[in-house]
Image (cartoon, rainbow, N blue to C red):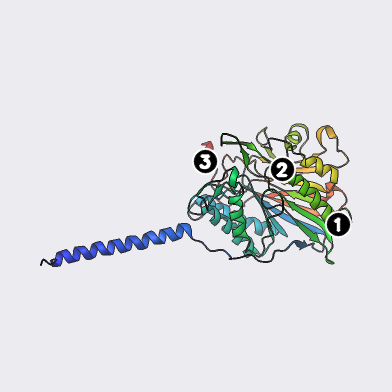
Amino acid sequence: MSTLSKKGKIAVSVVVCAVVIAVIVGLSVFAWLYTFDYPDGPVEKATSIELPEDGKIRVLQLTDLHLTAPAWNGRDSQTLEWVKEAIRMSDPDVIAVTGDAVGSNYFYRQRDKGIVAIAEICEEAGIPWMFTYGNHDGEWSWQTGAMVGPENAEQGKEEILEVLQGYKYSLMTRGDTDGVGNYVIDVVDKDGKTVFGLVNMDSHDKIFRENGEKSGYAGVTADQVAWYEREIKALNARGDGDVKSALFMHVPLYEYQDALDNYPLWGDFHSYTLQDKCYVPETNIGLYDKIAELRSTQFVTAGHDHDHNFAVMYEGPDGINADFPVILHYARCSGVNAWERRVPIGASVIDIDVLSDDVESMYKISVIEPPRDFYYDEYEGWR
């Protein structure tokens, strides 16, 4: 019967130790990549926020953060630091995250980790926050490990909603129409009466073609337009009269292109229009027409186009709705990692004088940018 020599035993021990260490390291890396903590289970969501005593509400709008892998991506770290700084600088009453907060088909649950990173910043600040999906947030499904298709188009967004449901200050709910995250947050006075509405709508992804490819942006559906009408009428009923509202979404209304082509810029902040094209929905489904009909929403804000940051006082095609102008606003891109971004990162601050009767004085839009000593990378694709 043969036995191992002393050197052989040492060699076996070394191999065993190396295997054990490799297994431990592998499991640690696996856990680091795949696991993360977030509140388990739904909590009761607020459906309203109280109007401050001065009758004004401040909304900080963050859009197109485009987090991809916050665990190791330096540009993501810069973006998250900017989110914290923007909250400190603006001191908002509510935060609106209007889509493309995270990338789509990133493995190891980095998409969900990005959502959690944003949620934790808002929760630590103790500020109510709204979330609206962009065209990239829900493109990937963790459950299937693949891009979503027409048969499971909402699956990725449902997964994100599940992550968000346990956060105390998250105002997002699913809604009862097409898409995920169509909901209205009431602004109420000290007596609990509804005096204003913050409407959030899912503007979806690109359109699935018969060959399986995607092109052209979908925008809202006819069912969502009907939902909007029901919700505005319900808002008016809760407010016992005509209640004004603002609409937050990602892909802009179809009419944004007409606004850019035929209307002067409005507002006193530094405006950027570095391209002639607005990436609007392929088909006009009539949401603006419904807005003009119901005469509640006089402010619409979107993200999506990283090189646009402007506002237009829009009176409809050929000024047909001159008696009901609507501010169409493109928010400043907030993400360092947003591709083809040529404008400085920043955030939009929307001050709403809820008790004003005039749209010109009801809304004040400004832009904040990082202080001079705040370093972040420029977009590298142009170099």
Q: Residues within 10 Å of mark 1 (few under 14, many from 20)?
A: few
Q: Position of residue 3 (x, y in %)?
A: 12, 67
Q: Secondary structure at mark 1?
A: helix
The residue depicted at 71 percent of the width and 35 percent of the height is 283
Q: Is residue 61 visible?
A: yes
Type of amino acid under label 3: Glu
Image quadrant occupied by the N terminus: bottom left
Q: Nearer the viewer, mark 1 or mark 3?
A: 1
Are the residues tagged 3 and 2 within 8 Å (C-beta)? no
- Amino acid at dot 2: Thr
**Residue at left 56%, top 34%?**
211
Coordinates of residue 97 in the picture (x, y in percent)? 66, 52
* Residue depth check, mark 3 versus mark 2: number of the one nearer the observer: 2
Q: CA distance from mark 2 to mark 1?
A: 24 Å
Q: Nearer the viewer, residue 264 or 320?
A: 320
Kindly identify the amino acid type of the residue bearing the numbered disc 1.
Ala
Residue 149 appears at what percent x and percent y?
A: 57, 43
- x then y, percent, for residue 69: 51, 52
Rate crowding at label 3 as few (under 14), some (14 to 19) or many (20 or more) other CA atoms within 10 Å.
Answer: few
Which residue corresponds to mark 1? 237
| Sequence-wise first label, 1 or 3 | 1
Residue at x-position 51% and y-position 54%? 109
Q: Mark 3 or mark 2, which has the lower sequence index? A: 2
Task: Kindly report the distance in space between the C-alpha atoms of the residues bearing marks 1 and 3.
Answer: 51 Å
Upstream in the sequence, badge 2 or badge 1?
Answer: 2
Residue 221 marker? 2
Query: Residue 8's quadrant in the figure?
Result: bottom left
Which residue is denoted by mark 3 in the rendering?
380
Give the distance between the C-alpha atoms of the residues marked 3 and 2, in whole angstroms: 36 Å
